[in-house]
Image (cartoon, helix red, strand yellow):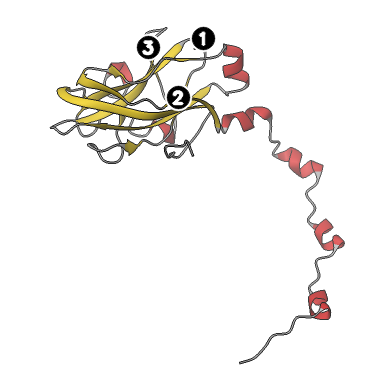
Amino acid sequence: MSLIKLNNRSLGNNAVTSAAIASNAITTDKIANNTVTQSKIDSLGSMLYSTDTSVASATASGWRTVSATLNLPSNDVITNDWAGMISCTFFGYISSGAHYWAWRLYDVTANSIVLPIDGPCSFQWYGAAGVGGFRFRGSVHNASNQPARVFDISGRGGNGITLEMRASNGSGNTNETSSQTLYADNIFWYAGAMTGMHNENGY
């Protein structure tokens, strides 16, 4: 077995000097090229706005409200601090039976569906014209964490929005009527754009 001995001299051969650091210095000019602005920070979300940890249940006969009404702040706050977006994630499932389930956000003040932003966050969205919603993820008949989805709330300042669920086909693109029961729990709302999932503590 050999023993490698490190001493001040051997370290010095590859010393990290001030000059070496300076040769790759992060200058003000370099930072300015990709300026991190307040709006960019806000658009990353991560600010927990509200939680609803009560367990909601409803018979799956049409779109059913499964959350308390979330009252949005002013349009100035939504635009300047939230980048026009809100994110939602929760645990949900439907009782045993033939149907699956879908979910969406609904503006109870404007009586309109709150649409997701374009891009990856709209994957498996079938909510146009009141049909479908986001297809469930995870186990259909056991409480499963739904990935955070990002919604466009531009111009909805002061309005109330709710989380809704409905029985659907397996793809989430067809509304179904069922005697099965829908369940939602640990609903987390984030200001701005949030991705990923959370546990019961919101992490």
Residue at x-position 76% and y-position 44%: 30
In terms of depth relative to the viewer, which is nearer, 93 or 112? 93
Residue at x-position 31% and y-position 32%: 92
| Residue type for callout 1 | Gly
| Residue type for callout 2 | Phe
Q: Secondary structure at mark 3?
A: strand
Q: Earlier in the sequence, mark 3 or mark 2?
A: 3
Tell me the CA gap for discs 3 and 1: 14 Å
The residue at which mark 3 appears reads as 112
Residue at x-position 29% and y-position 34%: 136
Q: Earlier in the sequence, mark 1 or mark 2?
A: 2
Q: Give coordinates of residue 121: x percent, y percent.
A: 42, 33
Give left or right: position of 63 versus 72: left
The residue at which mark 1 appears reads as 158
Q: Nearer the viewer, mark 3 or mark 1?
A: 1
> On the image, which quarter does residue 182 sit in?
top left
Tell me the CA gap for discs 3 and 2: 13 Å
Give left or right: position of 109 versus 2: left
Q: Give coordinates of residue 150: x percent, y percent.
A: 46, 29
The residue at which mark 2 appears reads as 151
Q: Secondary structure at mark 1?
A: loop
Q: Secondary structure at mark 2?
A: strand
